[in-house]
Image: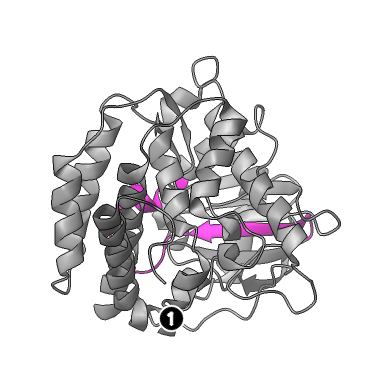
Amino acid sequence: MHDKAVDVRPGEELNLEQLSSYLQQQVTGFTHINSVKQFPGGFSHLTYLLDTNMGEWVLRRPPRGAKIKSAHDMGREFGVLEKLQPIYGRIPAPIHLCEDEAELGYTFYTMERVKGIILRNQPPKDFTLDEKLMRTISEATVDNLALLHQIDIDTTSVRDIGKPEGYVKRQVEGWIKRYRNAQTDDIQSMDEVAEWMLANQKEDGAPGLIHNDYKYDNLVLDANEPARILAVLDWEMATVGDTRMDLGTTLAYWTEPAEAKLMQLAAGNLTWLPGNLNRAEVVERYQQTTGHELGPILFYYAYGAFKIAVIVQQIYRRWKQGHSKDPRFSQLIHAVHYFGNLARLAIEKDRISNLVS
């Protein structure tokens, strides 16, 4: 569906007078904002659509009550876009970064809006996603991830955005620590998966560019040719490291049909619709596209599911502490259970597909 912005949620409004005054001083040619809307998708950042005299811009800022600075570093995300712009064309063009909270009370950046279709949480009413189309979209999605992972980080400045040495160990230990810091409930599956990951850590593979949140609702598709990806969005967690960890996260988001019936949040990723590749087929397609055998993928899938559960747990904790009034967040603890259980099932069954019936 075309990504439609809606009225701004209460408590998340922007002060347009202050914002306009600031941008007039910083961006050549900018004079005013005609209107502001908010994109309803996404959980980690607040994302707005600004209709300006220079066209439509997107503004991204951290949520209220955000405590995890590394996950809400506007300067870092803006810098990633700047580095990628000359070597990978499928990103929104960055416009301006404000890192001084004293200006408006928050950090933010603006970028051009890329218009197209974004597959959100429900099949679009004005667009038919038949099996043939979903097959080509899912194949294009995997092929583009493989393309990102094959960007030469050594002949560009992309390597500077992260530290690939020791990446796997840092991620496993780091996400377990984040879970403990954000934990609100005792969830046995999460404890078991954390213990299993520590006991089954893999050595670092060849480093590459990692998006870290690569899934359907972060892709802008061409409305006239939906299997053509116009832009990849949400680079807030991008880094460099073992790209199998990135594939694992994508696989964990890649909901299969039987799973979509169990969890509304998981069903929001439309990979369960007829025609899509399943997770095992995603791995096969990725290997064919890259020309590299991945070896056993279970560890990376379990890690991805655990990581998603932790991200959701962090958001749920913010809601529970009163930092967000978004009603979607009140049910997120069920998603933590869901992803923890999926990871445990995969470990028990020693496979990544057909985990539930």
Figure check: 53 above or below 302: below
Observer-nearest residue: 233 or 49? 233
Where's residue 306, x and y in %?
A: 29, 56
Observer-nearest residue: 324 or 356? 356
Residue 54 left/right relative to 346:
right
Residue 317 left/right relative to 51:
left
Q: Which residue lies at the image location 36% right of the left edge and 37% below the top edge?
A: 296
Q: Is residue 219 visible?
A: yes
Residue 74 magenta-highlighted: yes
Q: Amino acid at mark 1?
A: Arg
Outermost residue, top direction? 155
Observer-nearest residue: 58 or 173? 173
Figure check: 195 above or below 170: below
Residue 318 left/right relative to 62:
left
Where's residue 80, x and y in %?
A: 52, 37
Q: Which residue is mark 1?
A: 328
Q: Quick one: quadrant of the C terminus?
A: bottom left
Where's residue 138, x and y in %?
A: 64, 52
Q: Quadrant of residue 50?
A: bottom right
Range covered by the magenta-colored residues: 53-75
Q: Quadrant of residue 23?
A: bottom right
Residue 15 left/right relative to 29:
left
- Residue at disc 1, secondary structure: helix
Outermost residue, right direction? 224
Q: Which residue lies at the image location 68% right of the left edge and 41% below the top edge?
A: 90
Q: Quick one: quadrant of the N terminus?
A: bottom right
Colouring convention used in this rendered image of the protein: one colour
Where's residue 238, x and y in %?
A: 45, 41
Q: Which residue lies at the image location 69% right of the left edge and 68% below the top edge?
A: 3
Q: Is residue 180 visible?
A: no
* Tally of numbered discs: 1
